[in-house]
Image: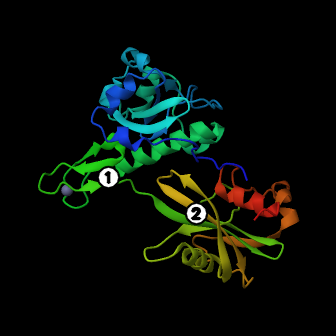
Amino acid sequence: MHRLFYESVDLDRDAVLRKRDDWQQVLLAEESLRILICHAGDPLFAWPEDMDAHELVVLGAPAVPHLDVDLHAGQWIYLGRDEGGPVIAVDIAPVVADREEAVRKLGGGFGDMRTRMANLSVDEAALAAQARAIFNWHQGHQFCGACGHPNLVAEAGYRLQCSNPDCGKSHFPRTDPAVIMLIHHQDHVLLARSPQFLPGMVSVLAGFVEPGETLEQAVAREVFEEVGVRIKRPQYVASQPWPFPGSLMLGFVAEAETTDLVPDNEEIEFAMWVHRDDVPNLPEKGINLPRPISIARFLLENWCAGHI
Ligand SMILES: [Zn+2]
């Protein structure tokens, strides 16, 4: 099975350096440093928004003083180092709030990350996804949940520290677990449509894990709630970080014990059983499969091929 989109490989998150106060100076002195620029979590592409771009803007330290934007006033996070060297992401929204102005100053374009990300290489997508998840977390946790005072960014972005000395609480990045499951019955797979999907698209079922629940229980509950089907033997297959805004998709495969489909008409507007051999032909009938970068598609293709 191939590597999933948004999954980084061989990235050393370098927890030792990111705890040091001088991590920025240390990294800026490294010749192989790569800097990604983001705006409210979205990475800067080398091409305008309306072009089918597949290249992120990657700067070295020498470029920083020559930019028309003061990067030092932005929000810096250290993503880690791979075989190409260390990688930093800088969010410039605190410096240039207006995205169009930022594009005028820097060139390129930010665009919608969900659609543009599909054009990136797996390595670039993994870095951009990691940056986006951290920036999203900062954005949603500007104030301490315990006392309401502003939080300060610490440990190269991986910890938020309450600025109130009487509280001083540390907050750590949040990841929301969600299960996504391919349900099959003999040679048929359960595909369903949510009103939030792109027009014509069907997919496997998914939902968030609730407190006090195992992953397997979440799989069974979500399937029953959404389409009224009882399942058995849920088996974990793979996971995928999904930075919209900060989920971890946990992929399962399970057998259906019952086959009557009763969509809940809220999260699911219709559901159907599709024979394994008919799945590749669905697009000819105007029914779209999930995008190739998604774990939903990964589960579907691997099940159709008999790998899971
Ligand atoms: Zn506090």
**Type of amino acid at the residue the image marks with label 1:** His
Question: 200 or 130, which is in the foreground?
Answer: 130
Question: 285 or 29, which is in the foreground?
Answer: 29
Identified at 65% across, 78% down, the residue is 227
Q: Position of residue 202 (x, y in %)?
A: 71, 62
Q: Position of residue 122 (x, y in %)?
A: 63, 40
Q: Residue 241: which disc?
A: none
Where residue 89 sits, quadrant-wise, is top left
* Disc 1/disc 2 C-alpha distance (Å): 25 Å
Q: Nearer the viewer, mark 1 or mark 2?
A: 2
Looking at the image, in which quadrant does ligand 1 appear? bottom left
Residue 11 against residue 68 in the figure, above or below: below
Few, some or many residues within 10 Å of mark 2 (<14, 14–19, 20+): many
Q: Earlier in the sequence, mark 1 or mark 2?
A: 1
Residue 41 against residue 209 in the figure, above or below: above
Q: Which residue is mark 1?
A: 141
Q: Position of residue 58 (x, y in %)?
A: 51, 26
Q: Which residue is mark 2?
A: 250
**Type of amino acid at the residue the image marks with label 2:** Leu
Kindly give the residue lying farthest to the left in the view shown.
166
Residue 297 against residue 46 in the figure, above or below: below
